[in-house]
Amino acid sequence: MNSLNFNNKIEILVNLFTFDNGELKVLLLKKNDEPYKGYWMLPSSLLMSNETVEELTDKIIYEMAGFKNIPTFNCSIFSDINRITETRIVGFSVIGIVDTIKSKLKQEPKDYEMEWFNINSIPKTIYDNGLIIKDASNLLKERLLNIKDLKKLFPSDFTIPELQKVYEQVLDKKLDRRNFRKKLLNLNIIEDTKEKNISMNGRPAKLYRFKEEIEDKELFSSINF
């Protein structure tokens, strides 16, 4: 009989992403104790035998980050035997999308520091959290080429330049303003709210929203520039 231990702990790690002024950001918490005191970490917790991944994900997001009703989807599994030196823990990565409105809401005071970081400027993180963030960022960029997922970031009004900044980071290239606007409008997936954003460089900019009926259409894959 094999004497190997089959008991493994499972850690759910939540990558909460949002866009802020055209920058894709992830929410991290500062670790207050050793090991890795002062380093940053993803919101996470160990899965109990009486709960599902989905239940624990929602619990982590609310209790550690203060958000409710956040759309999530599973990302990757990290099972390197030595990913955590103290004990054997398998990492299960989840992605959550926090819209631009919720991300700016003031959260209840916590006994730990919490901050949004640009995915290209991640501070020192514990264990393999940096690798997990990079993996989740790449998957999210692919998902955001899908209008249904992009809409989760912008459930309310936005300007076309704001949307262009998102695509420029997702596609990792500069896009022509007029060409982007023309092709986006031709897709017939957004509508003019008849309102304007007067805070954008002092010049009024039209505000748009995604049409409701695009949920039932064949999902948009990408804009060919």
Image: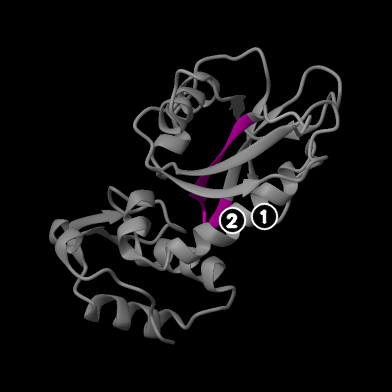
Q: Which residue is mark 1?
A: 134
Tell me which residue sits at (56%, 54%) in the image. Answer: 24
Q: Where residue 221 sits in the image (x, y, percent)? A: 36, 74
Here the colouring is: one colour
Q: Amino acid at mark 2?
A: Ser
Indicate left or right for 38 with 216 as reference.
right
Q: Is residue 13 magenta?
A: yes
- Residue drawn at point x = 49 percent, y = 22 percent: 107
Spot occupied by residue 161 in the image (x, y as percentages of width and height): 41, 66
Mark 2 sits on what residue?
A: 137
Nearer-the-camera pick, 2 or 173: 2
Vertically, is 100 above or below 24? above
Q: Nearer the viewer, residue 98 or 183?
A: 98
Residue 91 highlighted magenta (yes or no): no
* Magenta-drawn stretch, dominant element (helix, strand or loop): strand
Helix, strand or loop for disc 2: helix
The percent coordinates of residue 185 (x first, y second) are 25, 76
Alpha-carbon neighbours of circle 1 within 10 Å: few (<14), some, or many (≥20)? some
For the point 32% across and 64% down, the residue is 147
164, above or below 98, in the image: below
Q: Which stretch did the figure color magenta?
A: 10-24
Q: Pinpoint residue 151: horizontal percent, then vertical percent.
A: 32, 55
Which quadrant holds the N terminus? Answer: top right
Going by the numbered disc 1, the residue's amino acid type is Lys
Q: Nearer the viewer, residue 48 or 166?
A: 48
For the point 23% across and 77% down, which residue is it?
187
